[in-house]
Image (cartoon, helix red, strand yellow):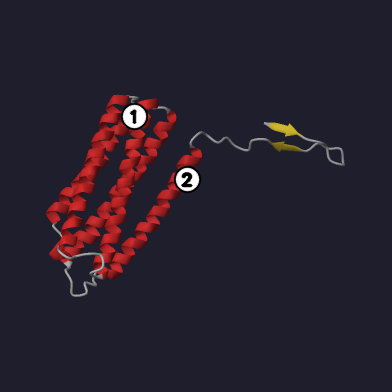
Amino acid sequence: MTVAINPTQSGEPVFYLADEHPHPEGYSTSLGFWIYLMSDCLIFAILFATFGVLGGNYAAGPAPKDLFDLNLVAVNTSMLLLSSITYGFAMLTMQQNKVAQTQMWLAITGLFGLAFIGIELTEFAHMIHEGATPQRSAFLSAFFTLVGTHGLHVSCGLIWLVTLMVQVWKFGLIEANRRRLMCLSMFWHFLDVVWIGVFTFVYLLGVLR
């Protein structure tokens, strides 16, 4: 829309655009969330780099081959990967506007996420019981920081998931809830990608050293 204001001294009117371009609803939310994910990428890149430097410093303590149970880690990895698949089913049913089925798949995703956190806490408890605490060596400090930060992200994702399930139950699949579910989807899949890096770089390569 073009609007005229008071003329200049030369007598010619000055025109300007009241709205330069439209701002669709949710535009700033999506942009802001992408910026957040990029900042999270930097955090994990720093943690991976730190582990790469300190991962071989055992201080005469236990090494990865002494601590890691790859079978248990493989089961834990499958829990997170399955949760990513079920969240994808939730997004598909959301597009079809099926509230009950969306809630069902979100609940299954949450159960897989809880299983992942449970197994990870069990692993941590076993390591600490064996004396492999974060203070024991630089390797263990880097390990607990990296894996623990990822676990904290998954825990926050589960809280977010439950919050959105309540919102969908109260208000249905309105546009705002769809946008929030899409943001959580990006966050959840991002955590899957990070965990694949953790599984490969920390566990597999650690045992092969």
Q: Are marks 1 and 2 in contact (CB under 8 Å)?
A: no
* Amino acid under disc 2: Gly
As helix, strand or loop, the secondary structure at mark 1 comes to: helix
Quarter of the image for residue 189 reads: top left
Image point (44%, 32%), residue name? 176
83 sits to left or right of 35: left
> Dividing the image into 4 quarters, which one contains the C terminus?
bottom left
Residue at point 50%, 33% (across, down): 25
Instruction: Determine which of the numbered discs, if any, sits on residue 94 in the image.
Output: 1
Residue at x 42%, y 52% (from the top left corner): 38
Q: State the residue lying farthest toward the right.
A: 10
Q: Return the x and y of residue 76 as percentages of the image width and height.
A: 19, 49
Specify whether residue 142 is in view: yes
- Residue 129 bears which disc, if any? none
The numbered dot on residue 32 is 2
Q: Secondary structure at mark 2?
A: helix
Question: Is residue 185 visible from the viewing direction of this image?
Answer: no
Q: Quadrant of residue 87?
A: top left
Task: Tell me the residue at 59%/37% (across/down).
Answer: 21
Badge 1, how many Cα within 10 Å: few under 14, some, many 20+?
Answer: many
Q: Give how far across and how far down residue 27 sits, in percent.
A: 49, 38
- Residue type at numbered disc 1: Met
Along the viewing direction, whichever of 48 and 68 lies nearer the viewer? 68
78 with respect to 37 (left or right): left
Quadrant of the drawing holding the N terminus:
top right
Q: Residues within 10 Å of mark 2 (few under 14, many from 20)?
A: few
Judge whether 101 appears above or below 37 on screen: above
Measure the C-alpha gap from mark 1 to mark 2: 23 Å
